[in-house]
Amino acid sequence: MNMSDIKKLDTEEIQNKVIELKDSILKAKISKLNQGDFDSNTFNKIKKDVARCLTELNFRNQENK
């Protein structure tokens, strides 16, 4: 997910996406740890997507003040 895709979403959709991404991080961690294998590349990609979403939310909150 890139910033241009995120900017197309409304605030509620971005918040839902953050929740969805955080859930996928947790599920990925648990499944990989249970298998004895942890893919840090996937984990880092999801973390970056969460950060992009949160950045856009913060930017929108500052604009609304």
Image (tube, grey):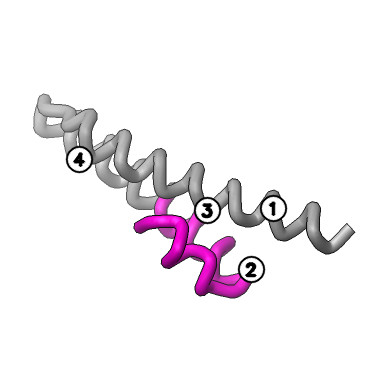
> Residue 10's spot in the image, x, y percent?
60, 74
The tag on residue 11 is 2
The tag on residue 31 is 4
Alpha carbons under labels 3 and 4: distance apart:
24 Å
Label 3: how many Cα within 10 Å (few below 14, some 14–19, many 20+): many
Q: Quadrant of residue 48?
A: top left
Q: Secondary structure at mark 3?
A: helix
Q: Residue at x 50, y 56 (%)?
A: 19
Report the amino acid beneath label 4: Ser
Instruction: Pick whichever, 63 or 41, lies toward us.
Output: 63
> Residue 44's spot in the image, x, y percent?
31, 34
Report the amino acid beneath label 1: Phe
Alpha carbons under labels 2 and 3: distance apart:
10 Å
Q: Which residue is mark 1?
A: 59
Alpha carbons under labels 3 and 1: distance apart:
10 Å
Q: Pointer 3 and pointer 4: residues touching (CB < 8 Å)?
A: no
